[in-house]
Amino acid sequence: MWWKTLSVALIIYAITAGMLVPLKPGITYVSPGVVKSGQDITLRVFGYNSFYTKARADEIRIWLQFDESNAVLGQKTAILNDTTVEASFQMPSGMPEKGTFAMLNVIVDHPVDGVSLLPSAVEFRLDTTATSKAGWQDNPIEQLHIVKDLSYPYRNVIYESIRNTYYHVPMWFALMFMFLGSVIYSIRYLKSQHLDDDKKAVAFTEAGLLFGLLGLVTGMLWAHYAWGSAWSNDIKQLMTAVALLVYLAYFILRSSFDEPEKGARLSAVYNIFAFASLVPLLYIVPRMFASLHPGAEGSPAFGSQDLDNTMRMVFYPSIIGFSLLGLWLAQLRYRYAKIQDVLYDID
Amino acid sequence: MKFFQSIRFIILVLFLSIHLPIVQAQGNRDFMRETGKIYVVVGVILLIFLGIVLYLVRLDRKLTKLESQLNEEKNEQPH
Amino acid sequence: MQALPLFFTLLRKEFVIEFRQRYAISGIFLYVFSMVFVVYTASIKVQPQVWNILFWLIVLFASINAVVKSFVQESGARQLYYYQLVDPVILVLAKIVYNTILLLVLSLLAFGAYSVVAGNPVKDMKLFAIVVLLGSLGFGIAFTFIASIAAKANNSATLMAILSFPVIIPIILTLLRLSAISLRLIQDTSYKRDIINLLAIDTILIALTFILFPFIWRD
């Protein structure tokens, strides 16, 4: 069937494109991490995926940024190798705003690599409490080289594992599609009383459970390296676990009836009820609690910051590919149940 | 049953191939965190692959049972 | 019979049965009091945070035990009799209203006994009363529906717990949050949104119960 081929093609595309396209150049860290006011200091910037030697030293510009209009420009830039660059900074004696310290962003502009930024990279400590804008102004961050090429955004801490967006997140979408298919066939069963519809509902639920488990396990692996621990009681982790419990209960309910017709009817009813209670579980409750997951205020959708256009080109095909794969698995399970029926009828 | 033995073998080889570099890399730094955590992505893809394979193995076992039942019935029918 | 008188007849029937089988209801109340005293003996000084969680746990378990019998106690013959006479929607509505009232009484009693032995840290009584009311309503709807499914199966008590816990989690999380606000454990001025969420969940559940109950009922 054409859609099975399509699912395989899309998943192969998601794996190859997802793994082969490089990350944008980024900054891993800056050393030293603390600078004092009035200090004349040489900062060393460590890049990730960067090719600093592809430009002359005087073409590379490095800023320590306080805010939109206040920044210090680095002098005497020197390239040590592809991933290390140095510049000396004449730190001003005061700060544009009140306070005794501030976190400065580091911005590197490279004619070939483009712009890379590390937020809150350097701590700026003040000896006095003076507020003066002297030294911060006249260093406008402009004429930046915006490089348009095929690459994924660089994010600190997660680095290359941003590619998991194409493999971990589609599990979730596939789960939703599977459970949606399951509830549609449960409704159809209640209308038609045709046991085939019930078999389809079961097949979809099984595939959905598989994707739920995979989403949870892959999420735990990713969380271990991105958030520090595999299980951090994040509200979305909890809600996914609860959703899996709902559908495990569905299978226990099925198995506790002797007559298949009665079991099919009651589990169809529970399936619809459970799916409807998933909606508050996944869309209302997460908004009440803080989450480590991306998306504004725990909303299940991504914001535009989390997904750029290049990522969309892999992300959406991956969702379709894994969902079709789920459909395939469900179809196999359904055909198995169908054959089993025929075989038992002969007895 | 030969089929399952071969699957077990494949899974064993897969696990070994994951583990060997880890053991080698433990000398200096955490293997998974090296080279920008790319192996976390590899791990996730492998987990998904293994999950789907295990599902297929389960289905395969069920089908084998059905087949053996079918064969029994075929043998009974001539009598 | 008209829908409304029928509804009240069924509701009265529930109360009459409950009153006749007094051992069932007194068993539930005894259960609540024992739980409260277990809490008391386990920890003399209960922190507000713990108070909040323990209170809702007591109410949750007591509610499950109170509601699970509402369909099991009906014998097969009586069910067949209802089935021929009564519109299932009105029947389930009567059960829900009865169970909600029962759970409300239950949680108020639990609150009374609990605040005697473990103190009463509630700062905003008005909000807490609303939370208890909404909680009884949510538990009443969800548990009545699940009990009607579980009653059809063989091991209904176990099934009741397995089936209802996942479904009840959104309600209980919202309740815990709201009652924490009424205990002044969290500062949140926008708790009205949570109340609306809770009402929305209750509405979804009750609408589903009306649609789906006829399918459970038919045998």
Image (tube, rainbow, N blue to C red):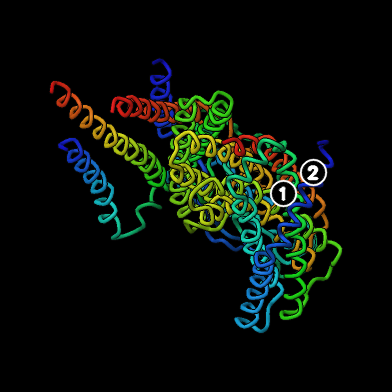
Front disc: 1 or 2: 2
Identify whether A165 is placed above or below A128.
above
Closer-to-camera residue (A60/C172):
C172
Q: Residue at x 30, y 26 (%)?
A: A343
Image location (x, y in percent) of residue B56: 32, 35
Residue placed most toward the observer, A214 or A26 = A214
**Residue C61, position as x, y percentages in the image:** 62, 63
**Residue type (three-letter) at the residue carrying disc 1:** Lys
Q: Residue furthest left?
A: B79
Tag 2: Cα neighbours inside 10 Å, few (<14), some, or many (≥20)? many
Q: Residue A214 bears which disc, if any?
A: none
Q: Nearer the viewer, residue C169 or A106?
A: C169
State the count of labels. 2
- Quarter of the rendering occupied by the N terminus of chain A: top left
Residue C130 lies in quadrant? bottom right
Question: Any mark on residue C7, and which?
Answer: 2
Residue at 27% x, 37% y: name it. Answer: B61
Query: Based on the displayed image, in which of its 4 quarters is residue B4 positioned?
Result: top left
How crowded is the residue under tag 1: few (<14 C-alpha within 10 Å), some, or many (20+)? many
Look at the numbered disc 2 and give the secondary structure of its residue. helix
The answer, for residue A75, to whether it is visible in the render is no
Q: CA distance from mark 1 to mark 2?
A: 10 Å
Q: Which residue corresponds to the image point at 61% horizontal and 54% vertical from the top-left?
A: C73
- Residue A164 shown left or right of residue C97 in the figure: left
> Quadrant where the C terminus of chain A lies?
top left
SS of the residue at dot 1? Answer: helix
Determine contact: label 1, label 2, CB under 8 Å: no
Q: Say which amino acid is labelled 2.
A: Phe
Left or right of B69 in this view: A58: right
Q: Is residue C121 above or below residue B1?
A: below
Q: Estimate the x, y position of residue A286 in percent, counting from the top left.
A: 65, 49
The residue at which mark 1 appears reads as C95
